[in-house]
Amino acid sequence: MREDSGRNVVVGIDGSEHSIAALDLAAAEAEARGLPLRIVHAYLWPVISRPYAPAARGRQVVRNAMVRVLRARPWLSVDSRVTGDGPAYALIGESRTADLVVVGCRGRDGLASMLARAVSTQLATHARCPVILVRPAGSVVPLTTDAPVVVGVDGSDMSHHVLGFAFGEAAWRGAPLTAVHVWTPTSTGDDTAAEDDARRLLDTALTGWPDKYPQVAVTRLTVRAAHPADALATASARAVLLVVGSRTGSALRGVLLGSAAYRLVHTAHCPVAVVRSTRTV
C-alpha cells in the first residue's frame, strides 16, 4: 500500500451502471494507494423547468454511492461533492490535486451516453493526473483473475511514466504485466531487422522495472500492425487494464489526445488508463 497524504482518488458518477463500475474500481484504487476517495457528481443547470431537480438528484446519487463504498470498505476515508459546474470542468479541476481520476465512458441512456463519452475524452485530454476510463460495465475483469495489465510502449521519453503507472497497477492487483510495442515494416521491407529493432527498443524501455517490481511477472510482446491502436485494442480483450500514454504538441497541447489514445478510449475492451504528457514539443 502506498501513502501520499493530502491527495486523493477522484471518481465521477452519474448513477448509471457504468459509473457504478467506475466507483467500485476507484474505491479499490484508493484502498491500494492508501488515499481517501472523493465522489463527485457534476451536472449542468437546466435552461428551463425545475432548476433544483438536478442538485437534489445528485445528492441522492452521491448518498447511494457512499453507502455502497462504505458497506464494502468501512475503513476507507470518503468524501463527496455535488456541483453544477459541469462534469468535464469539475473533474478536470479535481485532477489538479488528485493522484488519479476514474470515470465511466457511458451514461444512463442514449443522450447521456453521448455526453459521457464527450466528458471522458475531455478529461483524458486535459486532466493533470492519470485518468482511468471505464468502458461498458461487463468489460471490467474481476481483480481476482490472472488477466494482465497491458501497457503500450513506444520508446519515447514519456514511456518511463507510463511504465511506472502500469507496473504500480499490476503490483497492487497481483496481476502480470504484458508490455506491447507495435512496429511497422521499414521501407526496405526487411521485417526481420525491424522486428529485432522493436525487441531491442522494448528491452531498453523495460530496463530496471522488473528489478523494482520483482513480484510482477512480465511478458514482452512485439506486434506488427498498421496502427498501434489496432494491436492494443486486440490485446485489451483479455486484459484487466490497458495503460497508454498520450503526448500532445505545443500547438495542440491540451486540445487533442494522441491518435492512438483517442481511438483506444472508444475501442478498447477493458478500462483504459491514459497517462498524458504535458511537455511542450
Image (cartoon, helix red, strand yellow):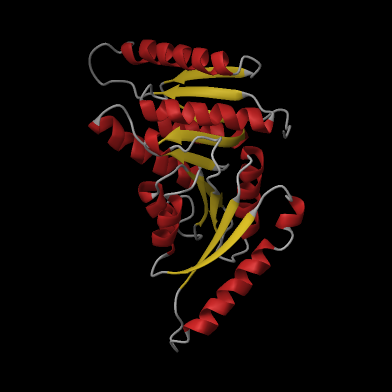
- Judged from this view, the residue extending furthest toward the right is 211
What residue is rendered at 59% in x and 57% in y? 279
As rendered, which of 98 and 220 lies closer to the eye?
Answer: 220
Instruction: Tell me if residue 89 can be seen.
Output: yes
Q: Is residue 109 above or below residue 267?
A: above
Task: Where is residue 138? Give x, y as percent.
Answer: 38, 35
Quadrant in the picture for the N terminus: top right
The picture quadrant where one finds residue 134 is top left
What residue is rendered at 73% in x and 28% in y? 5
The picture quadrant where one finds residue 188 is bottom left
As rendered, which of 54 and 21 lies closer to the eye?
Answer: 21
Q: Say whether residue 113 is left or right of residue 269.
A: left
Task: Where is residue 112? Give x, y as percent.
Answer: 29, 30
In this rendering, the count of numbered labels is 0
Task: Where is residue 242? Give x, y as percent.
Answer: 50, 49
Q: Say whether residue 190 is left or right of residue 9.
A: left
Task: Where is residue 228? Give x, y as percent.
Answer: 44, 63
What residue is rendered at 54% in x and 84% in y? 193
As rendered, which of 120 and 211 lies closer to the eye?
Answer: 211
